[in-house]
Amino acid sequence: MKFLKTGFTREDLLRIDEKDLPVLAEEVRAVIVDTVKRNGGHLGSSLGAVELTIAMLRKFDPFNDRIIFDVGHQSYPYKILTDRFDRFQTLRQKDGISGFPRRNESPADHFNTGHSSTSISAALGYAKARDLLHEKRHVIAFIGDAALINGLAFEALNYVQETDTRLIIILNDNRHSISNRIGGFSTMLARLSANTLYRRTKNAIKRRAGVGFIKALEGVRDHVKNLVKPSHANMFDDIGINYWGPFDGHNIKNAEEVLELAKNYYRPVLLHFNTVKGKGLPEAEADPTKYHQVAPVGEAKARTWSEAASEIAEELARKDERIVCFTAAMATGVKLERFAKDFPHRFFDVGIAESHMLTMAAGLAAGGMRPWVFIYSTFLQRAMDQLMHDIALQNLPVVIMVDRAGLAGSDGDTHQGLLDVSWGRAVPNLEIYAPCDESSLRDAMIRASQHDGPTLIRYPRGHIPSGTISPEVSGAVVKIHDGSKWALLGNGASVQTMLDTRELAEREGADVPAVYDVRRVKPLDMSVLDGILRRYETVAVLEENYAAGGLGEAVGAVIAEGDYDTGLMRFGVPDVCVKHATQTEQREMYGLTPENIIARYKTHEAQRTAR
């Protein structure tokens, strides 16, 4: 490569001649594509943001100015160009750099992200801190068009005028979230982009740039805004944020001119740049949804939990016309594309608006329908109030299908699904299931379809077992294997680990545990649990959830409050923010392995015997 070499820094970027910047852009793209093919990651958004990132880093100092990315799907070029080129090949790997901005990774990362629509709020906080501390720096929120529709972003936009501060908002408009963006706001952005008046914007900016930016701004203030705003009213201007654009986000020179003008402007300004998601990779440009996030080359393509859950939902929907399905801009991730095609009037993609989604589902349930909400565990965190206030308190028959529950791997700390059980156990009227295979998933979904109250069904990321690993019977707690002296209790992905633990105990000649599949976490089936606690000297509870508030705590409370002389061992995720690594590596990090379970049992048994 001509420019990206070992030791490349942002200072090297500033020394590159303007005419050579397109070459640098192609080199950055090549590095991203090569790394993501090996490690997996968010590809399309980052490819589309290369030129805009180059322009931004040539006009703003990332180590002094505060550049706040939204979500961070588009942050790969930024990482490469802010002194992390040498480490970029470790992207999303254990002890490597994160797939999202992280403050502890680089002084150029100023706010941790991973969930959508936080950038404007955080940037306003930074801007007011700057004002109160009398500092000299620019604050930039870099947000995508799909993230802009979320309620949090709207709340921040509404408050910009009240803060009386300078702020630059860069709107990277690639007309997609994961799939095509939806809703009335996307229509407004499309109308703004199509306005023929904006085709003259580039020349207007160029003429102003030619006489010197500071001089150009003297005495013209709002007139400068008029050069680059639409001829008719728009929402941003109406709420006190100057709208400029749209501009070509792939024209580095013109982007630099616009950014320089914005640096010297005295009021909050939103710069609207149009970009192409997947730019530079033909297959990604042709199918930006498919290439939003890609798996490493060579990763197995076996059937996933998401596919199995969506297929069962389709079967149930054919039998019950009241069933409707929801997603929040994640139809591809949760595999609802076919449901949307087969039941177009019973499918709702609300965009990145999880809170709205749950309350709308509650309204449909109150109106006589049977809503099914498909959502990643990490994103359910954004709608827990709606689950409690709007669904559970009214005991409405809404089914929450919680995808990516448990350890989620290389997406990192913001994307682990470790809170749904802990929070859900405290929610009245809510039943919680955690199936371990397709048979128990189907059983849980059938139960949920017949239940006249809210149900949460959690299932892990990755491939669903090809066969049954738990007996094909209906039940809240199902015995898989008998044992002596001690029993393993768990559910979901932990069931396979329990079976592996039993096999290891047999090979080592240790006490062989019984194995129980606790499919329903709440309410616990006390008729079965009572028998387990009276029969075995020790029970070990294994779960992919935070140990605080999980199944282990529930069983511990039963033991403590009942007439039991049963020892308890709990295996779950400790009180930590889980770093990015593979799911296998994460289980090893937190002792969720057969070897650790057996070792702890031997120590526990020795201590119990000694007493």
Image: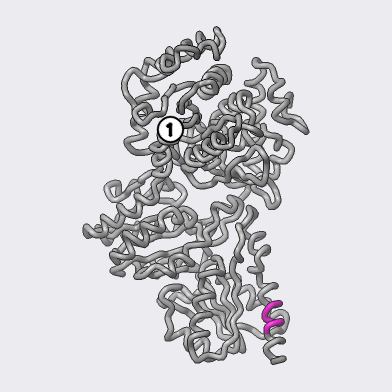
As rendered, which of 232 and 313 lies closer to the eye?
A: 232
Quadrant of the frame with the N terminus: top right
Give residue 220's quadrant in the image. Answer: top left
Up/down of 163 relative to 413, above or below: above
Give residue 307's quadrant in the image. Answer: bottom left
Asked whether residue 199 is in view, the answer is no
Query: Residue at point 42% right, 73% down?
Result: 522
Return the x and y of residue 109 as percentages of the image width and height. Answer: 62, 40
Up/down of 24 relative to 456, above or below: above
Return the x and y of residue 319 as percentages of the image width and height. Answer: 27, 61
Residue occupying the far left of the picture: 367
Locate residue 94 relative to residue 136 in the image: left or right: right
Secondary structure of the residue carrying numbered label 1 = loop
Span shown in magenta:
599-604
Query: Residue at point 49% right, 67% down?
Result: 422
Query: Residue at point 67% right, 28% down?
Result: 27
Q: Which residue is mark 1?
A: 175
As rendered, which of 115 and 317 lies closer to the eye?
A: 115
Quadrant of the frame with the C terminus: bottom right
